[in-house]
Amino acid sequence: MSHFARIRANLAAWALGSTVSSAEFDALDVGRFKSINGDDGGTWAPTAAIVVGGAGVNVTGPSEFTNVETFHLKGAMTAFSGAEVNLNSGSVVTGSVGSVVTLNGATTVKQLTVGPSGAFIFATDSVGTLAGTAYIALTGSAHIDVETGTKIVLKNGGALEAVAGSSLLIDSAVFASAGSNWSLDGPIVLTGSLTLNDNTKSFSWARKLSFASSSVGSIVRRYATLADANATIDVSKDHYVLPKTAGASRTYVLRHSTSPVPSNGQEIEVSRRQPTAAHTIRFEREDGTYIASLQQTVSTQVQTLKFVYFSTAGGWIAAEGSGQDFSVYDLGGTYT
């Protein structure tokens, strides 16, 4: 029932001089006994749910709700400074289609699952951090949108994993911070650009790297044009273009001991187009040991040399060459 039944129909039924029966006194006593003590408080165990309608309830003091099966909100729920919303093991927060969850402050999430057609959006100037072994799982057609001016940053020790059977579609530029790691076991589709900011970063994959069929896909290598002078070259560039004509024989030293330090298997390529004078271009390691050379004879071909770094093989070695008149020490001969 919504409230206790009236003992008498109205005030007129309590006329002065009327007799009050013991049953009526008992009904008044029972009603008082079953009422809630709003001043002293206490514990009650109603046999049916208490439903409060009308203007509702305004709770201004400390409150605790336990064993709540269903909690419906039509307005806002505010957690003030120092307050926490804790989800115990096995609990779930579900946002139905069309719902929005807005997090404007620091929020700690152990596991976040975005279901079909769902979206997780960071507002302007907000930051989302995954701590410990936390991760974001996307199912169905769920996705993460990185809009103009926003970014996903992998910090030192962080990882972005695309497990076997999954795919990573990149429509815009991606930047990886120093110390971060990408572990990609599934196919990677790049329709934008992938930028590694310096030589301490690397991008590796276990399966394949493919470009969208509707775009002109390419891997752009870093290159530099060398001056007609002795110089030191390193892995800050992938390809060095030698001057067509040298005023004298030149020596280029392949550096490895100072930054940027090459990784095992990293390559440097040099090329020269149609040399026109007889001078030798020599390539050495930092300790002065000979690696390879190009003989600058008159030629209509392009001369190229590729060097690969292996710390266990003495450092830089010459892996291959093409064109006319080049000498590769590690391969044991002069090739014309």
Image (cartoon, rainbow, N blue to C red):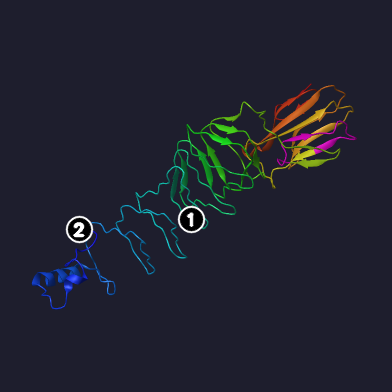
Question: Is there CB contact under 8 Å for labels 2 and 1?
Answer: no
**Can you identify the residue that label 2 sits on?**
47
Q: Which mark is residue 248?
A: none
Local crowd size for mark 2, using a 10 Å CA cut-off: few (<14), some (14–19), many (≥20): few
* Position of residue 7 measured from the top left corner of the image (x, y, whole percent): 16, 67
* Position of residue 161 measured from the top left corner of the image (x, y, whole percent): 51, 40
- In percent of the image, x 34 and y 64: which residue is there? 64
Look at the magenta stretch and give its main secondary structure.
Answer: loop
Mark before the other along the chain sequence, 2 or 1 = 2
Local crowd size for mark 1, using a 10 Å CA cut-off: few (<14), some (14–19), many (≥20): few
244 in relation to 145, above or below: above
- Residue 274 placement: quadrant: top right
Q: Which mark is residue 107?
A: 1
- In this view, the residue in front, 279 or 35, is 35
User: Magenta region: which residues?
Assistant: 234-251
89 in relation to 78, above or below: above
Give the quarter of the figure containing the C terminus.
top right
Q: Is residue 325 visible?
A: no
- In percent of the image, x 86 and y 35: which residue is there? 249
Q: Amino acid at mark 2?
A: Thr
- In percent of the image, x 84 and y 31: which residue is there? 280
Q: CA distance from mark 2 to mark 1?
A: 39 Å
